[in-house]
Amino acid sequence: MTTKRVLTAAEKAKPFASFYDIPLTPAPQEVFDLLDKGPINPADALPIDQRNELLEPGYLPTERGYCIMPDGTGFVAGLTKMPGVTSEMIDWWFAWHGLEGLRYAIWDTDDHYDIHVAPEDLERRLNPKLSLRERNWNTTDIVTEDVGTGSMVLDISFISPEDFGYDMDSFNKGATTAISANLGPHEPKSRLVCFSHVAREIPGGIELRSRFWIGWNIVDKIPVRVDQGVPAEVIAGLCKGLAYHCPKEYHNLAAILPKVYVQNAHIVDRLEDFRK
């Protein structure tokens, strides 16, 4: 079992270190009361080939829940209201936090242990010629975290909304940004999940509509099954673990992000500071 991160003297001197000692802001209890009722009806889930429905006005039959689909893959949905947060803050966060472990740890001090950007992707992640939104596309974060199934080292490989297969005319009307990726174990390297966190404006902030599809990846804009040989109990465990982990981390992010952004977004990260 991985224990909570012990900060070094250098980490304690970081301008954002104080967020590590702040208690996590919990998700509303009704979120967990709903999840405690057990899996949703798969008929109310969003199949991966219908993901463009996330770009339409209104809400889908399930905005919070998890289940095993008839084909044996898994599905997780989440919805996080984020008052005071903008889409620019979300884009900045995903360009910024993967660069060092403490940045990841303040997001969820219980379950996020370490992170770094794949060395071959550092130059793109820190390229000032790219927008914040573009910097994480086609890059990979290597993370150590517990998503409810025990500590794991995972590769999170980000892709653009277009490469995720969204219809971009619909996307530009129905979303302000999206964080989408394929992920899976770092060693042995494999892929097992894809996800998309789609943001849209609401009064006073944004809401993030999250979807995880376990057993799928997006390759060349097309959904591809990637769960061959994975036991059904592993798929089920990931479904339930992600369903509970997602509201925990994203409600805390909603609470800290406006302050972290104001304090740190103006500080320029230099490539030479992150090369080993």
Image (spheres, helix red, strand yellow):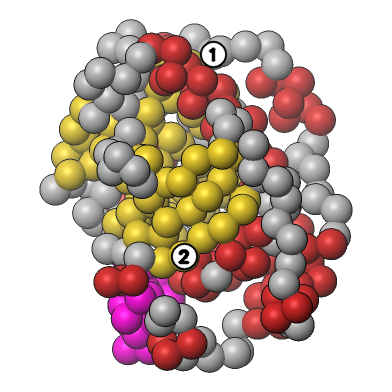
User: For mark 1, what is the residue?
Assistant: 40
Residue 69 placement (x, y as % from top left): 37, 14
Quadrant of the snapshot with the N terminus = top right
The local secondary structure at tag 2 comes to strand
Give amino acid for label 2: His
The local secondary structure at tag 1 comes to loop
The answer to whether residue 33 shows anywhere in this view is yes
Quadrant of the snapshot with the C terminus = bottom left
User: For mark 2, what is the residue?
Assistant: 116
Q: Residues within 10 Å of mark 2 (few under 14, many from 20)?
A: some
In the shown orientation, is residue 61 left or right of residue 230? right
Task: Give above or below for 275 relative to 79.
Answer: below
Residue 261 placement (x, y as % from top left): 66, 76
Residue shown at the point (21%, 27%) measured from the top left = 225
Residue shown at the point (17%, 39%) measured from the top left = 222
Q: Residues within 10 Å of mark 1 (few under 14, many from 20)?
A: some
The span picked out in magenta is 122-137
Give amino acid for label 1: Ile
